[in-house]
């Protein structure tokens, strides 16, 4: 007689929602690096410029200034040396009354 009873229980529907979010905007990765070159006497030193803050006297990343052979193209100190891409060419940026100028120099690596 069970065949004549109305159905009161139904299978519970399983609903599965899968979602993924993908960004269509490509964010460029900057390969630019820059150094500040200083000169004391006849010796030059380069220090990497970063956005990091480091307490005075602490050993932080980036490392302490490194010895750098003073290129003749750098006439005023401190100077900013920039590598705009992953290449090995760097440029020193100098500001004169005529505007901003760049000259090729060895990278301080």
Image (cartoon, rainbow, N blue to C red):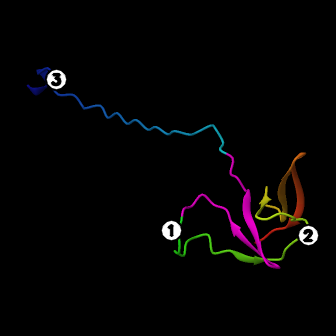
Disc ID at residue 87: none
> Is residue 48 a member of the stretch shown in magenta?
yes
- The mark lying in front, picked from 2 and 3, is 2
Disc ID at residue 72: 2
Please say if 42 is above or below 48. below
Q: Do the residues labelled 1 and 2 touch (CB within 8 Å)?
A: no
Looking at the image, which residue is at 73% across and 56% down?
31
Q: Earlier in the sequence, mark 3 or mark 1?
A: 3
Q: Earlier in the sequence, mark 2 or mark 3?
A: 3
Residue, disc 1: 55
Which residue occupies the foreground of this view, 89 or 65?
65
> Is residue 17 a member of the stretch shown in magenta?
no
Is residue 40 shown left or right of residue 9?
A: right
**Pointer 1 local density, CA inside 10 Å: few below 14, some 14–19, many at least 20:** few
Which stretch is magenta? 28-53
C-alpha distance separating marks 3 and 1:
75 Å
Is residue 9 shown left or right of residue 86?
A: left
Looking at the image, which residue is at 63% across and 60% down?
50
Looking at the image, which residue is at 49% across and 40% down?
20
């Amino acid at each position: 007689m069970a065949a004549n009873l109305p159905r009161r229980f139904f299978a519970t529907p399983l609903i599965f929602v899968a979602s993924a979010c993908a960004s269509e905007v490509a964010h460029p990765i900057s390969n630019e690096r820059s150094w500040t070159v200083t000169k004391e006497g006849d010796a030059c030193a380069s220090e990497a410029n970063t956005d990091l803050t480091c307490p005075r006297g602490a050993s932080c990343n980036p490392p302490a200034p490194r010895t750098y052979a003073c290129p003749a193209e750098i006439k005023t100190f401190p100077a900013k040396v920039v590598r705009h891409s992953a290449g090995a060419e760097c440029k020193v940026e100098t500001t004169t009354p005529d505007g901003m100028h760049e000259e090729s120099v060895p990278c301080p690596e």
